[in-house]
Each structure stands twice: as C-alpha cells, then as structure tokens.
C-alpha cells in the first residue's frame, strides 16, 4: 500500500501559514482522512485544528520523512466541506487578500469551529498560592484563553519553564447533538407475553402500557408521546422500565428555528400557486428554460415593488425541485427571513431549511446537518447561507440584490452575490438577481448583455397601483410650526387613514431618542472615548450610547466642561417619534421596530405578527420596515426625514437614498385601496427624491451613471480600499504615508491612488483609521502588488493592522 500524505491548512490565521502543510497519514487513519474533514495535528509545540484540502502519495521535494509529522486524529466521520467549498475558500482567500483558513472556518456552523482550552496540571513543588491563583486550588483544571490576562499567562509560562506546572492545549469539538429521554418498547414478544401472564389484574395502567408495547415492539416514543397517547404518569413509565416492558433511551431532538405562527404575518399571501400575469410568465419561462438546459445564466429581474417577483422565484424553484435539484434562496437581512421562510415553507413544506446569524448555535448546527445529510430541497437565509452544503444546486435566487448587507465588511471580506455567481458557475445553474432598484453595477452589466434583463412593470395584483408620492419641504414646516417630526400634511393623512381602519408605516432611519446632547452655554457634546463620536440619547434606558462600540454612560445633568445645567437634546430618533405619536394620537398604539426593540430572539416576528393581526395600526421603524413587508391594509407610508443618508461622505449616498425611498414607498397600496406616500425632506430638489417621487428607476439610473462617469467611480472603475489602523494616531498616520509612497513607485501608471486620509469615522473602538483608495480599469491589475503589501504588513508592529477590501460598498 502506497504511503499517503495529507495537505492540511492549519487553524493559525497568519500570512506566513496561509498555505497547506504536509502531514503523514497513519495506516489506521487512512480510510478516515479525506479532503474536507477536520483533523487534529501538531503545529509547533501545540495541537491545532486543521482542514484536509488534498491527498498526495508523493512527499514534496523540500521535505524529508523525518520532518513530516503524523495526523493525530480525525474529528469527522465524513467530509464537512465538499470539493466545491474547498475550491471556493481558496478562490475567496486569494481574491480578497485574506487567509484560507478564515474562509474554511466561515463555511461551517459555529459548533464546528475549534474551541481551544489549556489544561493546567500542578507538578511537585508548586506553591499553594500559585495553585489557588491559577488552578483554583485543584490538581488539574481546563481553562479558556481569556481566563487570564497577558500578565497571568506570562506567569504561567514561567511556572511551566521551571517545571512546576504542566500546560497542554486541548481542542474541543463544539458540535453537540441535543438529546432527550425517550422510552423504547421491548422487541421480544415472548418476554412481553411472560410479563403479561405475571401481571396482576389490578395493574390497569401497566396492562395498557404492555398492550401498547406488544402492538409496537422495538419502537421508540418520547416521554411526551407516551403521556399524550396513553395518559400515563412518569411513575408508570418508570415502573414499566423496572418490569422490562420499556427501556430508557436517549434520542436526538432536532432544533428547528420557529417561524412566526400568526396567519396574518404574510398578509394576503397564501401558500397556493398563483396564476402568473404575462410579464411574470415571460420571466418564468426564461429562467426555467435555463434550469432545464443546465445553463449558467445570470438574470437580473427588475420589477417594481409589488410586481410579484417572489411568485416568479417560487414557481421557478418548484421547477428545479421537480428535477431533483436544490434551491438556494438568499435575502439580505434576518428581518426578511421569517416572512420569506413562511412563504417557502407553505409552498415546499418540511424540505426547507433556514440559515442566518439570528439562530442559536444549536439550531444553526442542526439545520446545517439537515442540509449536509441531503434532507433539504430549499435553503432560505441571509448572507452566510450562501455557503450552505448543497451538492445538487439547480437555482440560486438573490432577492433585493442591491442591498449592501450582502457584503461582509469585517474580515474575511466577501460579497455573497459574488459567491452565488461562483457556485452557480460550478453547478452550471442559473442565478436570478431580483430588485425593484438594482445596484448600478448589476444594471450596467445587464445593459452590456453580461446579465439578461427581465422586467416587471406592473403590480401583480391587478387591483393595486403604485402609490401617489408627495414631497414635503420641511424647511417651511420648521418656520411655520417649530421643531416637529410631523408636517401638517402627514399628520392630516395619518389621521384620515387610521380613522378608516387602515394601517400606516412610518420610517425614520435613526434609532434612539435624540441624535446627540449638547450644553447650550459652552457647546460641549458628550463623546464616546473609544470612537470620539457624539453619543445617541436613549430615554428608555436613560443612557447615552455609541452605536459603533456599544459604550454607554448615564445622561449628564450638569455639563462636565462648564458646570451649566442647560444640557439639552438635539435631533430625533425612533424612540422620540414614538413618544410624540403617543401624545398626538393617543388612541392608536404604535409598534416600534429598530435594533433596540428587536434584540431579543423572536421579537421581530412577534412585532410583525401583532401588526398583521392589527393589534396596532401604526408601524414605526428604521430601514428594517422598508423591505419585504406585505400587509394589504397598509395604505399610508410616511418618511419622516429622507435626508439621513444624503449627507454621508459616500459616493453611493444618492443611490442608497433612492433605493430606500422606493422600497419603503412600495409598502403602500398593495391591495385594492389606493396607497399614499409622504416624504419629508430638507432637500426637496435633490434628484434622488425627484426620481423616487415618480417611481422612475430608469431616469435615476441614467443621471447617476452620468455622475459616476464624470467622477470616475464604479461601475466605470474598479475600486480597492486599503485601510490602516492603530491605537496610536501618529504612528498609523506616518505608516500609511510610507505605504502610499511605496505603492506610488510600483503601481501601474493607469491606476489612480487617492489618499491617504483619515477615514470619515476616524476613530472607532480605541483605534485610529486611515485609508487609501485605488481606482482602476482592469479588475486584477494591482493584485500581485497588494498581496506583497499584505505579506509585508505581517511583519509590522502587533498593534498596526492593514486590511485590503475589493469593491467596498462604502468608503466610510
């Protein structure tokens, strides 16, 4: 038998270890070590988790047998990563200037990621004080890395060096199956007959249990099932165990994410298949033709709000499922997954799985295992669901494809939309990118013929029409009525719609009570020490909070700068608007949706369910109320301040504002009643608002593209953001300037370098940020140079960090 070697990527995320290492596969593990399994290997002086990415019979030329270590153990019975996902991880790491192992870990549920602990064992001579300090007075303990400070670990290493303490790394597998107690009937009918003969006439409960056991020999039922079917007590079950009728066993319980149970949640939407109109049918025919031919085509489904894009998705998905293939259905936010999950489950039943970050680690692990075991036909989820272990992909749907939440901004960086395109190409399956307001990049590709454009120009409900949009100039309102969140026009419409028993959605894209607090005497504004940003006031918790690092402190009553008591609130947030609504319309309860009210698991579902059942007629929230919601009785939408995103230092600010306004306006008038939209703004002449008023995506697209062309921004140029950070502002400023000079000497002449400059939010979580932007015509023109830069950055001081982001969704 030929000697076998494994190529293993170790769980040590540094640039120096960003490659596979060769390990010897012992004969006894030969059958278990396969590409895609997790293993335990020795690396340096410790044991670490590793991912097998390949097998070879030949030893690399630069290694000898003596240098190659053995694989210690295999953690999986079968591969947890397919050859497709292994290839994808390598491609993403290369493309996004990141670590291979970071993407391998990202593709697995948290339960399958390594948990490292240290086993500390006292040796002869260890003092009682050290035993108490580091081992809690015991002989041996298992501790997490965060159990001690850096100073504590230095002391532990000194004790180890002096032979007083033994320190060993233990890698724990967190993937645990949930079990519960159940009772299994005796499979031996002769034994059961014997027990029957010996039972006394008075043992009626035992007789019933025995008769049931004889009718179901060798079968297992949960305690709940026994009690429901036979109405027997726990004591009776335990007596039956003692008599030999039953046996106690542990059975696995699959943790399934609960979906919102209220029928009103999906509004007028039912699980049955609907008749498509001519535009929907044409889009459906093009997509299903590609499914049947196994074509890797990308379709951009541009449909106005309420045009029935979801029904096209579902019927196309059914076609793929009928062919024995699987469907991946991506939505941009957790907020949208419950509604979409309900619609998919109504259509496809229990063959649906849900994956998003709002699940508990146990639920996510069990859903992942259902998919991995091939028990699932459709996966619905947010960004990370794009890595679901599906092996027969026949269709990928990316709903609201323009959303920036499809891009992961923290390391490792990736775009779920790009990953979807990779996977579709691998499986030779079509992709449908759907949106009422496609990103300029996608729309430009459709115009060039790279994607096929499918359009839906009318609402699916023939009785529904696009709502009438009115723009209100808040500059005049402020002069007439003073500081208020409600123009008279919006207030009058709100009262009229509510009086008729209809519902309203109000959006203000800022949570909290007020934007900031300021002293009226000296102008002092309390700022967060970690980010140097003005903190937002939250009246419900009576605190000032930073929404970036979650630092909070009590609301000051006296100005710490000048001692004045004239501390006042400025600006507004959803919490303040809720208070104002309660004063203006006391007879109408309000449901508020923002990050503060939906932190608790299931809170979002409960709130939407209550709104669907009309427990409240007003739904107030941040941008999470703008997308995906379909309630037939919503006839009025009010945007309290359309300017919150327009003033941001971001070249996509106008595009994002137009998309958000168009999306939220689309919540109104989705049934028979005519919808109305009121947009309040201090910039009534801005082109993004003018085009949103007319529901004119094509007009906005043409004007914004002209601006992007003049400014040399995407989609005419590819961009790369190089971001440097450090706790020391002077050091990061100097180092970034040196990097800029180094790059300017080496970059191709046609690559533009902007910066360096401080990031718009220059300090966050105690770190100072500087950035540079590269603009280029060819996508991969500077890749080799940037990889060299990332390699060099590994040798910098520990406090200095460099990140390279391809095609960032924001430069803020």
Image (spheres, helix red, strand yellow):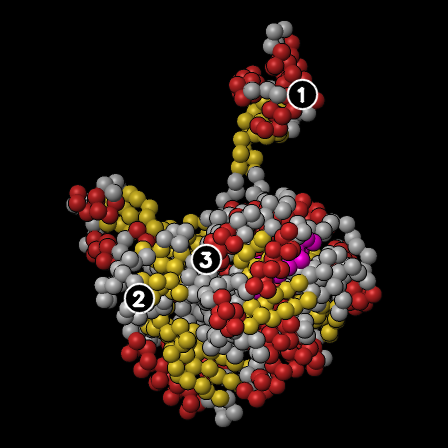
As measured in the structure, the alpha-carbon distance from the residue carrying label 3 to the one carrying label 1 is 62 Å
Report the span colored magenta.
Answer: 625-639
Residue 519's disc is 2
Question: Compared with residue 790, is residue 409 higher up or lower down, i.e. above or below?
Answer: above
- Reading the chain from its start, which is encountered first: label 3 or label 2? 2
Residue lying at the far top in this picture: please name it.
201
Label 1 residue SS:
helix
Q: Give the residue displayed 67% in from the left and 51% down from the top.
A: 500
Residue 527's disc is none
Left of 793 or right of it: where is 228?
right
| Total numbered labels placed on residues in the image | 3
Report the residue marked by disc 3. 576
**Crowd band around label 3 with a 10 angstrom C-alpha radius: few (<14), some (14–19), many (20+):** many
The answer to which quarter of the image holds residue 2 is: bottom right
Left of 35 or right of it: where is 126?
left
Q: Quadrant of the C terminus?
A: bottom left
Q: How far from the left and from the top, in percent, is residue 405?
A: 54, 65
Left of 375 or right of it: where is 776?
left
For the residue pair 437 and 765, the one nearer the viewer reads as 437
**Crowd band around label 1 with a 10 angstrom C-alpha radius: few (<14), some (14–19), many (20+):** some
């Amino acid at each position: 038998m030929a000697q076998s070697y494994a190529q293993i990527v170790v769980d040590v995320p540094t640039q120096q270890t960003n490659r596979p290492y060769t390990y010897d596969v012992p004969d006894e593990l030969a059958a278990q070590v396969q590409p895609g399994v997790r293993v335990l290997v020795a690396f340096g002086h410790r044991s670490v988790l590793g991912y097998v990415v390949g097998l070879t019979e030949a030893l690399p030329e630069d290694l000898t047998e003596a240098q190659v270590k053995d694989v210690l153990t295999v953690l999986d019975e079968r591969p947890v990563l397919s050859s497709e996902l292994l290839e994808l991880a390598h491609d993403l790491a290369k493309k996004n200037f990141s670590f291979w192992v970071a993407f391998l870990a990202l593709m697995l549920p948290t339960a399958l990621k390594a948990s490292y602990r240290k086993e500390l064992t006292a040796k002869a001579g260890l003092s009682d004080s050290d035993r108490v300090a580091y081992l809690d007075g015991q002989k041996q303990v298992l501790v997490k890395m965060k159990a001690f400070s850096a100073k504590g670990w230095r002391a532990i290493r000194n004790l180890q060096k002096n032979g007083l303490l033994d320190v060993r790394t233990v890698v724990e597998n967190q993937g645990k199956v949930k079990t519960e107690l159940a009772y299994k009937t005796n499979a031996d009918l002769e034994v059961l007959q014997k027990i029957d003969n010996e039972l006394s006439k008075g043992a009626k409960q035992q007789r019933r249990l025995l008769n049931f056991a004889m009718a179901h020999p060798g079968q297992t039922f949960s305690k709940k099932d026994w009690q429901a079917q036979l109405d027997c007590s726990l004591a009776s079950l335990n007596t039956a165990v003692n008599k030999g009728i039953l046996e106690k066993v542990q059975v696995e319980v699959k943790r399934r994410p609960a979906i919102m149970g209220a029928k009103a949640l999906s509004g007028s939407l039912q699980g049955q298949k609907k008749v498509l109109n001519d535009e929907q049918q044409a889009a459906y025919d093009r997509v299903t033709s590609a499914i049947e031919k196994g074509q890797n085509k990308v379709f951009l489904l541009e449909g106005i709000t309420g045009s029935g894009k979801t029904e096209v998705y579902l019927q196309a998905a059914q076609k793929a499922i009928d062919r024995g293939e699987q469907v991946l259905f991506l939505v941009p936010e957790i907020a949208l997954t419950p509604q979409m999950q309900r619609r998919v489950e109504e259509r496809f039943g229990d063959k649906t799985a849900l994956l998003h970050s709002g699940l508990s680690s146990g639920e996510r692990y069990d859903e992942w295992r259902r998919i991995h075991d091939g028990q699932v036909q459709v996966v619905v989820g947010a960004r990370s669901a794009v890595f679901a272990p599906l092996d027969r992909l026949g269709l990928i749907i990316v709903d609201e494809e323009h959303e920036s939440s499809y891009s992961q901004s923290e390391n490792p960086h990736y775009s779920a939309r790009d990953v979807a395109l990779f996977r579709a190409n691998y499986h030779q399956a079509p992709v449908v990118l759907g949106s009422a307001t496609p990103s300029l990049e996608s729309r430009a590709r459709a115009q060039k013929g790279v994607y096929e454009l499918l359009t839906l120009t009318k609402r699916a409900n023939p009785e529904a029409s696009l709502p009438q949009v009115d723009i209100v100039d808040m500059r005049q309102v402020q002069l007439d009525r003073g500081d208020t969140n409600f123009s008279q026009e919006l207030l009058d419409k709100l009262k009229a719609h509510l009086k008729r028993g209809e519902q309203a959605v109000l959006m203000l894209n800022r949570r909290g009570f007020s934007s900031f607090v300021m002293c009226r005497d000296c102008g002092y504004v309390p700022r967060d020490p970690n980010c140097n940003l003005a903190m937002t006031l939250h009246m419900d918790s009576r605190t000032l909070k930073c929404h970036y690092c979650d630092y909070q402190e009590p609301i000051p009553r006296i100005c710490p700068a000048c001692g004045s008591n004239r501390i006042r609130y400025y600006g507004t947030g959803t919490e303040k608007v809720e208070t104002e609504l309660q004063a203006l319309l006391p007879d109408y309860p309000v449901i508020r949706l923002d990050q503060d009210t939906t932190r608790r698991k299931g809170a979002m579902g409960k709130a939407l369910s209550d709104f669907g059942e009309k427990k409240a007629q007003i739904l107030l929230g941040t941008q999470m109320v703008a997308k995906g919601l379909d309630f037939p009785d919503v006839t009025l939408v009010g945007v309290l301040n359309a300017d919150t995103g327009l003033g941001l230092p971001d070249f996509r600010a106008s595009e994002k504002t137009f998309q958000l306004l168009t999306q939220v306006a689309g919540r109104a008038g989705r049934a028979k009643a005519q919808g109305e939209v009121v947009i309040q703004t201090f910039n009534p002449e801005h082109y993004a608002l003018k085009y949103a008023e007319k529901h004119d995506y094509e007009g906005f697209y043409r004007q914004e593209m002209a601006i992007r062309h003049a400014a040399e921004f995407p989609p005419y140029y590819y961009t790369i953001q190089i971001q440097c950070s450090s706790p020391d502002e002077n050091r990061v400023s100097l180092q970034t300037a040196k990097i800029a000079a180094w790059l300017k000497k080496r970059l191709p002449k046609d690559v533009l370098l902007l910066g360096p400059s401080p990031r718009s939010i220059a300090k966050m979580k105690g770190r100072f940020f500087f950035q540079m932007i590269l603009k280029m015509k060819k996508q991969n023109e500077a890749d080799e140079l940037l990889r060299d830069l990332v390699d060099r950055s590994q040798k910098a001081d520990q406090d200095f960090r460099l990140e390279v982001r391809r095609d960032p969704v924001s430069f803020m």
